[in-house]
Amino acid sequence: MSYRITGSTGEWEIVVGLEVHAQVVSEAKLFSGASAEYGGEPNTHVSLVDAGFPGMLPVLNQECVAQAVRTGLGLEAEINLFSRFDRKNYFYADLPTGYQISQFAHPIIGKGKVLVDLTDGSTREIGVTRLHLEQDAGKSIHDQDPTRSFIDLNRAGVALMEIVSEPDIRSPEEAGAYLRKLRQILRYIGTCDGNMEEGSMRADVNVSVRKPDETEYRTRCEIKNVNSIRFVMMAIEVEAQRQIEVWEAGGTVDQETRLFDHVRSETRSLRSKEDAHDYRYFPDPDLLPLVIEQSWVDELKAALPELPEAKRARLEAEYGVSRYESSVLCVEQATADFYETVARGADARLAANWMLGDFFAALNRTGRSIEDSPVSAEGLRELLGLISNSTINGKIAKEVLEDMVETGDSASAIVERKGLRQVTDTGAIESAIRDILTANTDKVEEYKSGKDKLFGFFVGQTMKAMKGKGNPALVNETLKKLLSE
């Protein structure tokens, strides 16, 4: 998809690479047995290893390694059977050891790809450069006291997967689509919950600009720790515009790390951007190289759940849903599973229409998710069955669904309690229609003289007289017959 920003000297192209930090789903931290659970009182999920006490040795958590391999498989990436942990040396108050254990020269996962869907209906492949495991730092708290800062080490040592994209992204939209798809894959596999509001997934955004005919990259700036997809998209737009203004004014863009302020819609300089040699990487002397067996990788691959793209293709083939419908139904695995439970015992097309329409609208209106829906998949399937066997019509079904959401009662029980069964007695329908035609002889004459649009008026009046219970097909059929007399 072509995306350009127009400056005073013409058009500019955006070049973006994303470094996504995804917290690994694991009960324990990467190198200690301390809890990796989110929250808790400050400094209650901290071991001596996490606190950097002298003599404490890290012990690698095998489940974190397995989660990284599962993610690599989900990204169709190279799985490196040999990898190594390195020390990344820098000093912050919330990094007790003075270094972060990460992977530099030999990451556990190599090149992969993410296929994203864009709003114009096209797809785009974004390359993944690598995925490596590393430990998170603690948290500095500056707003609890006017003169002091506090340190919470609960997150220190929590396992992160840093997923680095190629500089393939060319617009804020593509960046948003990439992050949504990446989060979807991680959630399907169960390797990261993707909750950006809790910090379990955040992004460093590398932005540069260049003229459309240029092939080399210009200087990039890194925007650190952006914690929502919307803010990532905003930050790209703002930073690209800033860089364009610098270049067009005859200046040069400095390689630096910046902060995005969404309130002021601006990026601000934090510090000059470090290069790898500034961190003095060297192999961690307390950890042996990580060597894994191909047979273990094969076992993990065999146990993977059906991934989003495969699930979408299957739903389209088995149930006849469109590409757009499959994209919505498969956003969350729970939603796709819910749909399949409904569709297996009902009209699959009707199930898709109702889920994407009235059912989702009811969930949004009540602030519910699919997991805590007051209407089960079996309950929605029963409701659709009542439509298919002509017990009720679509209009009555909407009323029944609202009652199901409020009361939790079954569709059949509500239909019986409220007397909502559809009238299929042709005699009763014909009697109601004759009354309508007798009361509107002038409109009958207008219809017969060529005003065909009045047919809808007669249908509406008949359904009103029958309190919405008339079978629409029979009403239409009987009306045509009587109007032709």
Image: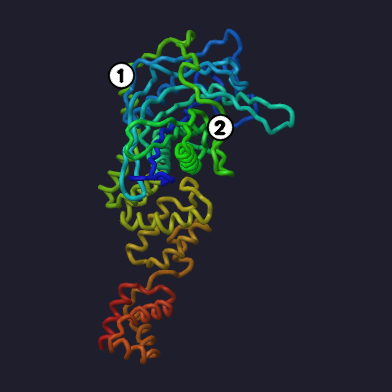
Q: Residue furthest front?
A: 250
Quadrant in which residue 164 is drawn: top left
Disc 2 marks which amino acid?
A: Ser
Q: What residue does disc 2 label?
A: 269
Q: Earlier in the sequence, mark 1 or mark 2?
A: 2
The circle drawn on residue 294 is 1
Mark 1 vs 2: CB contact within 8 A: no
Q: Give me the residue at 34% from left, 40% from top.
A: 212
Q: Give me the residue at 33% from left, 51% from top.
A: 343
Q: Give me the residue at 37% from left, 80% from top.
A: 457
**Residue 424 higher or lower than 66, as above or below:** below
Q: Residues within 10 Å of mark 2 (few under 14, many from 20)?
A: some
**Residue 280: image location, x then y, percent:** 49, 14
**Residue 240: image location, x then y, percent:** 46, 40
Query: Label 1's element?
Result: helix
Question: Does residue 102 appear in the picture of this structure?
Answer: yes
Give the mark toward the camera: 1 or 2: 2
Quadrant in which residue 460 is drawn: bottom left
Question: Does residue 232 appear in the picture of this structure?
Answer: no
Q: Nearer the viewer, residue 99 or 320?
A: 99
